[in-house]
Image (cartoon, grey):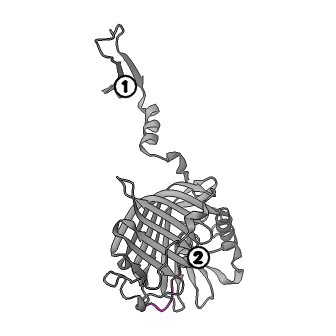
Amino acid sequence: MINLARIRSRGILTLKIRRSVPHEKYEIKHPPRVMYVSRKLLAPVVLCVLLPGCVRLGERLERDILTTGKPKLRHMLECLGENDSGIRSFQASGTFTVESPQFGGKRQCKGKIVYRKPTDLYIRGRHKTWGFSVLLLTCVGAEFLLEFPRHKEKYYYREGMQFEGVPFSVSPADIVREVFFPESWEKLRRKEVRLVGYDNSTQSATIEIGPANRPRRRVVVEGPPWVVTRSELLDERGGVRAITVSSDYHVVEGLRFPRKVETEFPAQQTRMTFELRAIQPNTELDDSLFLIEWQPEYGDQPDRSGPAGDRGAGALSTWK
């Protein structure tokens, strides 16, 4: 058996290793060995033991200093488009939080997050101690299914359904795009994109997309290299449909990823937060992850006592 004793002496961390065996079979004929290890050498080892997946965090994004004043819009769009086009998919571990009256308040879990362009998303959240599934979210094209297995709750949504009191439909595809890739930068027409503001002290620029008198999106980017830190999806009247804030960018395999993404849909009083770790871009993904195998069928009875309310009012279909 190996016994470890930790001794602090003169700023040096000492690991004392004593070999001991049952005395009735063996006789120890050698003195205990003492090994001295410098704190500076041990610190990185301890950190990697305490932080699983640290080798996959990537490097924190370092920004360049602009010396030429106001940057050109064309360079910003090219930088954004080059990065996004290099990402076909990714999977990561992390924390997922959803807050909505539709789901009875705030739900949070840690687990696996898998995304595939353009709008496929799979999340499996597990109990932090026992490991059983507490949340399953699958979004594919026009369909969205959120399940809480422990409570036997299912929230199904498809494109075309509307929320009560909201004059527009937020489709599942809209939700996924807002969270990860709100625009196809390389496909934007030059005349529909405008640089409307620039702050030299923070090297941040504000870009509007759409008609000048009725933009559909307002974006704040920081750089270089340029990354989106805030995106607002606007309705025809200029009201905010969705707000996404991305932060703590890291570089993984040459691609820039935010470690934290927060998306809010004000009219629905819904907020989704992703905190990502161990990001793996462009890995092979199993198609079975993106299958919605359950749908409400004729004869099923929606639960009208919960937060989803009356199905006829256009809220999420909720079954228990």
Question: Of residues 173 and 82, which is closer to you in this image?
Answer: 173
Residue situated furthest front in the rendering: 299
Q: Which residue is mark 2?
A: 141
- Left or right: 165 as drawn, with respect to 115: left
- Left or right: 319 as drawn, with respect to 113: left
Q: Position of residue 120 (x, y in %)?
A: 58, 69
Q: Please, what is the three-letter code of the amino acid marked with disc 2?
A: Gly
Question: Of residues 67 and 257, which is closer to you in this image?
Answer: 257
Task: Determine which quarter of the picture holds residue 4.
Answer: top left
Magenta segment, which residues?
164-171
Q: Position of residue 262 (x, y in %)?
A: 46, 69
Q: Please, what is the three-letter code of the amino acid marked with disc 1?
A: Leu
Residue 217 visible in image: yes
Q: Residues within 10 Å of mark 1 (few under 14, many from 20)?
A: some
State which quarter of the image contains the N terminus. top left
Residue 3 position (above or below residue 194)? above
Residue 64 visible in image: no
Q: Position of residue 303 (x, y in %)?
A: 35, 82
Could you say whether the residue bearing mark 2 is in a helix, strand or loop? Answer: loop
Residue in the picture at 48% in, 74% down? 145
Residue in the picture at 70% in, 83% down? 191
Q: Position of residue 165 (x, y in %)?
A: 41, 92
Q: Which residue is mark 1?
A: 15
Alpha-carbon distance for marks 2 and 1? 57 Å
Q: Earlier in the sequence, mark 2 or mark 1?
A: 1
Magenta stretch holds residue 28:
no
- Left or right: 132 as drawn, with respect to 71: left
Tell me the chief SS of the magenta region: loop
